[in-house]
Amino acid sequence: MKTFDDLKRDVVDQGLCMGCGTCVGVCASGSIAIDYSLDEPEPQLVKDCTECGHCYEVCPGKNAPLRDLDKRFLGRERDPEKEPLGIYRACYKGWATDPYVRTSTSSGGMTSALLNYALNEGLIDGVLLAGWNPDPPYWRCRPFIATTPEEVSMGLRTGMMMVPNNSLIAEAVTRRKLSKIAVVGCPCHIQGIRKLQAHGQPKKFAEAIEFTIGLFCAATYYGEGTKHLIQEFANVQNLDDIIAMDYRGGRWPGSLYVVTKDRKIHWAGSKHDYTWHFLGSASYKRDRCLMCIDFSSELADVSCGDIFQEVGHVNRRLVATLPRTSVGEELLAGARAKGYIELEPHDPTLIPASGMGWEAKKHAGMYRLIQRKRYGWPTPEYQYPLKVTALPRTLTFPSA
Ligand SMILES: Cc1cc2nc3c(=O)[nH]c(=O)nc-3n(C[C@H](O)[C@H](O)[C@H](O)COP(=O)(O)OP(=O)(O)OC[C@H]3O[C@@H](n4cnc5c(N)ncnc54)[C@H](O)[C@@H]3O)c2cc1C
């Protein structure tokens, strides 16, 4: 059996750990914990390893076998050249019908509305989410467990940091005794959950997962990038002065701002624009994210992302929504029937040109992997052949 030492040697010390937290989440003995004292969240051994091997088996850092996982969870292999978004059953633009949920969330509240529906209907007892640090420093993100719609609304909108949501699986199932949970996360979180379900152990944890909502993801960013934006663009030097923060404040798609103890709001970049993203954070993409080739959370039950093109709606709060499994389809149908969400057909060929994320993963990331392999540097294995395929498309950005 592999031990945490093997995981540390083969994944963490090779720079292949994403910080998704799955290793912590499956450790029934509580031997692994996330070390938040470091600049970036990282798993560490906090007591004796029981050598069960689960942490190694479920880790997507070194090995995310997309082909096997496609076959197992989505019913077939994809054609990597013809299916740039992975396998999905439908493509919608959707939104939360509750105006508060629609406007207080990242893109249009699809994710939160689906969770609210699932919690209210008893489909799940809880969900693993990302939120703000409950203790100082308040500008850092942490995972948390929500069991009510009120708690879902306490999650952050889009946290441009790595948040180890999966690290709370054991906490949710064992300590909080939640037997039906959902997980929200970036592609790496979803890969970790699928690996757990495929591994099937610890059984109680694997069987507790009812569904996953995967976010489109260009990358997560080093906390250092956020620090840079706060100090150099929002002009707040003392990070201890911060009492609240938002990466997507103001009008969609939103900007980063912090609130200081004197109740003043400090914007990084001009209000209502997205410049902070390009100004600062793009330079701070986490190295492991640069090696990821999954943009649209290709293994999730439902994938959600922004829509940056003009699509004939005055209200820009719309969510590109891709159900990929029967579980995802039923979730959408149920939430729609109960009035939580609205859906309209969306042209999937628009998605690769929506923002820069698809490009970052499917072309730049793919090419980077090819290069790294050439030099024998550590890389994750994805099973599908690595190939950069031209995809003619038009880049557009909506007027505010
Ligand atoms: C790091 C990151 C990068 C992204 N990049 C892109 C992109 O390039 N292109 C694109 O179209 N969309 C991207 N998205 C997705 C987009 O920001 C929205 O999350 C998505 O459109 C869903 O919107 P919503 O209104 O349905 O979500 P909401 O209802 O606001 O719910 C969002 C959920 O995401 C969870 N969450 C927030 N941050 C994190 C995090 N860091 N890790 C795990 N969970 C988190 C929250 O807990 C919340 O439950 C990204 C999201 C993240 C977190």
Image (cartoon, grey):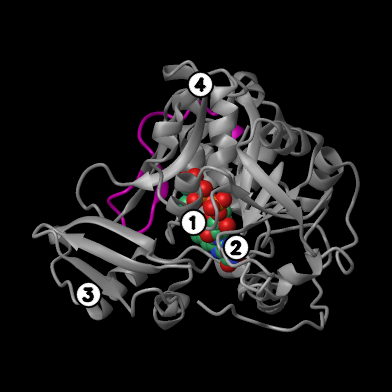
Residue designated by label 2: 306
Relative to 257, say whether 125 is above or below: above
Residue 173 — which label? 4
Query: Mark 1 — residue?
Result: 106
Residue 106 place in picture, x, y as percent: 49, 56
* Residue 231 disc label: 3
Whether pointer 4 and pointer 3 mark residues with C-beta atoms closer than 8 Å, the reply is no
**Picture residue at 60% right of the left edge, 28% below the top:** 118
Characterize the local packing of mark 4: few (<14), some (14-19) or many (20 or more) Cα atoms within 10 angstroms.
many
Give how far apart the Cα atoms at labels 2 and 3 are. Answer: 28 Å
Image coordinates for residue 219, horizontal then vertical, percent: 54, 65
Quarter of the rendering occupied by the N terminus: top right
**Residue 298, relative to residue 271: is it above or below?**
above
Residue 391 sits inside the magenta stretch:
no
Q: Report whether the residue tagged 2 is closer than 8 Å to ligand 1.
A: yes
Given this view, does label 1 or label 3 mark the residue nearer the observer?
A: 1
Is residue 47 covered in magenta?
yes
Q: Where does the magenta region start and end?
A: 35-55
User: Could you tell me how far apart the alpha carbons at marks 4 and 2 are, in whole angstroms?
Assistant: 31 Å
- For disc 3, does the CB lie below 8 Å from ligand 1? no
Residue found 56% across the figure and 35% down from its top: 115
- Inspect the image, locate mark 1, and give the three-letter code of the amino acid beneath it: Ser
Q: Is residue 61 visible?
A: no
Q: Indicate which disc, 1 or 3, sits on the residue closer to the N terminus.
A: 1
- Contact, mark 1 vs mark 2 (Cβ under 8 Å): yes
Residue occupying the point 61% across, 19% down: 204
